[in-house]
Image: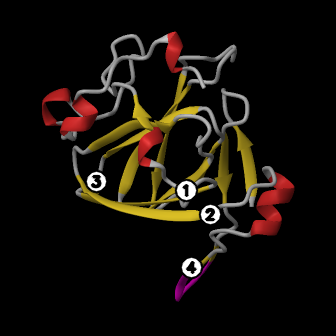
Amino acid sequence: MNVIKTTIPGLLIVEPRLFKDARGYFYESFSQREFDELVCPTVFVQDNESRSVHGVVRGLHFQKPPYTQAKLVRCVRGRILDVVVDIRKGSPTFGKHFAAVLSEENHLSLFIPKGFAHGFSVLSDVAVFQYKCDEYYHPEADSGIQALDPALAIDWLIPEEEMILSDKDKARPCLCAEDAI
C-alpha cells in the first residue's frame, strides 16, 4: 500500500498495490498490519455500504463526541467525488475541505481521521460506496453540516439542479465555530 499525504494534516489517500494480468486484477483491499504501520493504529468496528444513483449528494455527516469516528472509505462500483471538511477544534485548517475522486477504476481509499465532516456525490450512473468506522453509529450523536454551505464553496461536480439530497441533509445548518469537535 502506498500512503499519500493531502493538503490537510492527518487526511490520507491510500493506494493499494494492484496485480493485473489477462484474467483481471487482484489487490488486498485492507490489511490491519499494514494500516497500523503506514497510517495509524486503528481498530475498525463497523463496515457500511451504500448504493446511490447519479446526482445523489450524501453529507456532510459526522458524529458528535464522545462518538466521533475515523473512517476508511472507498468506491467499489462507479465513481464518486468524496469530500471532507475539517471541523477539528483549534485546527489551522478548520472549515477547509478536501475532495478526491474515488472509483472502481482507481481503487483509491481515503482515510478520514476523527474530526471531519464527510460526504460524497455520485458522478456515475450508479455507485456502491463502502467504509469502515472505528466507532459504532450512535443516533443520538448524529450530526452534519449543509453540503451547499456557500462559505465552504464545494464544487460537487454535479449541477445544483441535478442534485438529489435527503430531506435531513437539506435541513442541515451551515458550518459554524460551535461545530468544532
Front disc: 2 or 4: 2
Q: Residue furthest left?
A: 161
Give how far apart the Cα atoms at labels 2 and 4 are: 28 Å
Q: Secondary structure at mark 4?
A: strand
Tell me which numbered mark, 1 or 4, is placed earlier along the sequence. Answer: 4
Give how far apart the Cα atoms at labels 3 and 1 are: 29 Å
Determine whether 166 is above or below 146 in the image: below
Q: In the depicted view, which residue is nearer to us: 87 or 142?
A: 142
Mark 2 residue type: Val
Give the residue at x 78% y 50%. 39
Determine whether 76 is above or below 159 in the image: below
Q: In the depicted view, which residue is nearer to us: 78 or 34?
A: 34
- Contact between labelled residues 4 and 2, with CB atoms less than 8 Å apart: no
The region drawn magenta spans 20-25
- Picture quadrant where residue 103 is located: bottom left
Front disc: 3 or 1: 1
**Residue 136 got which mark?**
1
Name the residue beneath numbered marker 3: 124
Q: Horizontal and vertical percent for residue 131?
A: 51, 58
Mark 1 residue type: Tyr
Give how far apart the Cα atoms at labels 3 and 2 are: 29 Å
Mark 4 residue type: Tyr
Q: Specify the principal SS of the magenta part.
A: strand
Check the picture and name the quadrant holding the C terminus.
Answer: top right
Give how far apart the Cα atoms at labels 3 and 4 are: 22 Å
Front disc: 3 or 4: 3
Q: Secondary structure at mark 1?
A: loop
